[in-house]
Image (cartoon, coloured by chain):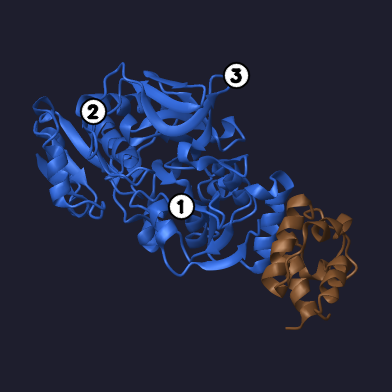
Amino acid sequence: MRTILEHQVNLRVALLDEAWSDPETFVLLPDKGGVTAEWVEAQLSRVPCELHTGHFVMLTSGSTGKPKLIVGSRMRSEGLARTLHQWQDCEPVGQAILTLPLTYTYSFVNQWLWSRVVGRPLVQTAGLSRPEELGATLRQAKDAMLCLVGVQVPLLEQFFAGQAFPGVIRVHFAGGRFPQERLAVVAALFPNASVFNNYGCAEAMPRLTLRRANESPEASNIGRPLPGIELASDKHDALRFRSRFSAVGIVEESSGFTPITDETWTPTGDLGRPTPDGSWQLLGRASEVFKRYGEKISLASLLTTVLANWSGQAAFYREADLRGEEGHVLVLAPAPEDAQVRSLLRALAATHPRTHWPIRVESLDTLPTLSSGKVDSIALRSVPDKRSHWHQRI
Amino acid sequence: MDNRDKLKQLIVDVFVIEPEEFRFDLKRDDIETWDSLGVVSLAVGVQETFGYHFSPEEAVRVQSVQDVMTILEAKGIKF
């Protein structure tokens, strides 16, 4: 199988078009995926021969930190790109502007593949790593679509304060919590844009649900499944899906190749519940709901309170306290004033008992992110020199 | 930093009040976050700051900043 690396695509995106036109299955990898070439080769050797043509392979570390290869079908993914286009074709989007790496299934399917399938131009940028260039591109945008992750909003606000980009008419968010509290910022930056909350995962390749921002005031509302996709949850709220657009298989080091068919129910790794109107409410990552001193803690719920009271970036990582009880540490960026920390904790106190408060409040200048733009929760825990602002005493 | 300043800083930190809200005559009812787990936090904070561990009876008896000072003064910690 042909391997294409992120930096090669950044230099010449036509490489992807060539690979897509070639029957041989190709592998698209980030430059820093946390795995060796030998690891990739060993996992690829487990992909069945019948998938060596007409498919593509991407790497995801997911929120679990355990890398896996996702095998996608070109035909199924093109079907999803068409479905997304039909589903959302209420504004005449003329171009897609890339601010995320194409090695992320969200931008790969929603933007690169969409632009290929519907014949619209794709504008490459280095995203927020080169804000001046991105700003220039956004100023020249005409009927453009952006795919962002929520954690980018404070950075967009920081880099482009007071600016507006009227040429952007559609903004999608995925890859973590929807920035419900920052919609005013998004609207100021993109005054003509329809804003959407997308939900999905790499195994879904990658979209499952969609909602317009104004359809719900709740960040946790992920909308309804796209046509051809079903969601279900069990008595523990574990959310799973089946989709005619999903990946056709996963390769994990521990379990080898696992096929996915139209009939396969695949876990998303999240917790969720249906709502009476047919949309779904996300309760957070399965690993982000736990018990502390007998109290059920939902980090997604806590983050909602934090972000309603803090204009910078925020994320949690899990850690046991000195008594061995499971807990969580809040990391803010940039560094807050002491008064801001107290104000945040009072906001938490207004809605949550003290057991829900973080073990510590720490800060960094910026939160570590994956190449997808999502917060790197593994690095967040291990990054040295975090400043400590407050600690819990229970 | 003298003991009064240390106590003020501890109360501000444990109950996440603003420094200007602090008074030495503050009572439990004056502070919303002074709940049962707040008492536990205060006890741990007193041990961290002054090296004295409240007995369970003392922890229950503490209803004001002044009560904290009274207990600590009885242990030779001057304010």
Residue A152's disc number: 1
Task: Tell me the residue that label 3 is attached to.
Answer: A276
Q: Residue at x 35, y 48 (%)?
A: A372
Distance, label 3 to label 1, CA atoms, is 32 Å
Q: In front here: A58 or A61?
A: A61
Query: Which x, y percent locates residue A232?
Result: 45, 21
Query: Which x, y percent locates residue A7?
Result: 21, 55
Picture layout, residue A67 above or below residue A163: above
Query: Which x, y percent locates residue A113?
Result: 26, 35
Task: Tell me the residue that label 2 is attached to.
Answer: A258
Picture layout, residue A48 above or below residue A230: below
SS of the residue under disc 1: helix
Residue A55 lies left or right of residue A108; in this view the side is: left
Picture layout, residue A154 above or below residue A145: below
Q: Chain of mark 2?
A: A
Q: Colour of chain A?
A: blue
Residue A234 lies left or right of residue A9; in this view the side is: right
Quadrant of res A15: top left
